[in-house]
Structure formats: C-alpha cells, structure tokens
Image (cartoon, helix red, strand yellow):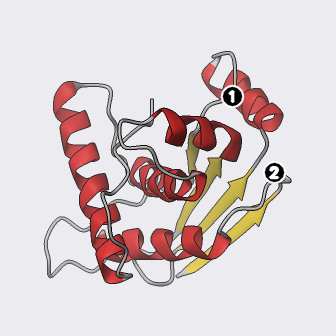
C-alpha cells in the first residue's frame, strides 16, 4: 500500500498514526495492497478555500475526500480487489482540535485526526452519510475500524465518538 502523508498545516500531528490507521482501514476493507492514497494536512485557511471551491460552503471543515479511480471493496471474500489510485484525503487539525474538545467523550486532536482519516477512507470507497441508513452503516464501520486499530495497538479507553459533520 502506497500512502503519502504531507503535513502542510504548520501544526505538529502524529503522521505515523495517520499512516498506520489509513493502512489498517484499507486492509480491513480489502483494498488491493498496491493501491495508492494521499493524505494532506492543511491549515484552516486552506481547508476553507477547498470547502468553498468544492462544496460551496463557508468556513473550514474537518475532512474532505477526493476520489480518483472510485475503487470499491470486493463484494465477496474470494473476489480479487482492484488496484488503483484511491485519491486524496484532506485533514484540518484546527477543526479536529475543536471537535475533539467538544465531543461527548473529549479526545485529543490526534485521536480526532485518526477518526477523520478513517472517515475519509470510507468516503473514497463510496460510503456516505446523507441518509439515516447510510449514516448508520458508515459510522458503524468507522467505529469498528477505529476500535480494531486501537485494540491492535493496545490503546485503552473509549474510542472517539464520531464528530464529523
């Protein structure tokens, strides 16, 4: 799995954890091991520009996903996953910090960025949360991936609750 993490935000973030959880999520979703992903960490101004340009919404957001080859997880266990470019995930640590502090179970910026990375991966794979049934599926899968990754790393305490908008 080729995953690049590029921090352009000026904020120190745990890039290794972002890389690790992205790799874990893609493996868990059975994405081809030669697929490629880019994660870019930007400041609030850059995120706001992207948010306005692509969503026509004001202000910075927490995560944006830009799919390339529209890869999907294989439908059956014995299907060979396709290889390709997943696309880009853009994260904003300033928004992640605020969301982590405001969450029901307060957590750190890095924990929020890990959650947002999984959220972004799922969007790249075609998941959405516009409708209640889609939201239940996506957020359930997101929680299972984050919980599995945390358990594998021996991290204790509650996983961050979904705070993405």
Q: Residue at x 65, y 68 (%)?
A: 14
Q: Residue at x 59, y 43 (%)?
A: 96
The residue pinned by badge 1 equals 60
Give residue 44's quadrant in the image: top right
Left or right: 97 as drawn, with respect to 115:
right
Say what secondary structure mark 2 lies in: loop
The residue pinned by badge 2 equals 9
Q: Give coordinates of residue 158: x percent, y percent.
A: 30, 57
Q: Residue at x 72, y 54 (%)?
A: 41
- Quarter of the C terminus within the rendering: top left
Crowdedness near tag 2: few (<14), some (14–19) or many (≥20) residues, C-alpha within 10 Å: some
Q: Give coordinates of residue 68: x percent, y percent.
A: 56, 54
Name above or below for residue 92 compared with residue 20. above
Name above or below for residue 139 compared with residue 113. above
N-terminal of the two: label 1 or label 2? 2
Front position in the image: 108 or 130: 108
Name above or below for residue 23 compared with residue 160. below
């Amino acid at each position: 799995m080729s995953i690049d993490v590029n921090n352009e935000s000026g904020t120190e973030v745990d890039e290794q954890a972002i890389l690790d959880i992205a790799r874990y999520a893609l493996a868990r979703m059975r994405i081809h091991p030669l697929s490629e992903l880019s994660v870019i960490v930007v400041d609030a101004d850059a995120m706001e520009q992207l948010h306005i340009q692509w969503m026509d919404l004001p202000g910075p957001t927490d995560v944006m996903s830009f799919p390339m080859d529209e890869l999907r997880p294989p439908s059956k266990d014995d299907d060979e996953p396709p290889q390709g470019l997943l696309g880009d995930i853009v994260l904003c640590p300033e928004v992640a910090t605020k969301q982590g502090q405001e969450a029901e179970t307060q957590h750190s910026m890095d924990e929020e960025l890990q959650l947002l990375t999984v959220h972004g991966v799922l969007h790249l794979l075609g998941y959405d949360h516009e409708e209640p049934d889609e939201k239940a599926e996506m957020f359930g899968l997101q929680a299972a991936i984050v919980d599995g990754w945390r358990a594998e790393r021996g991290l204790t305490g509650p996983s961050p609750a979904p705070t993405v908008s």
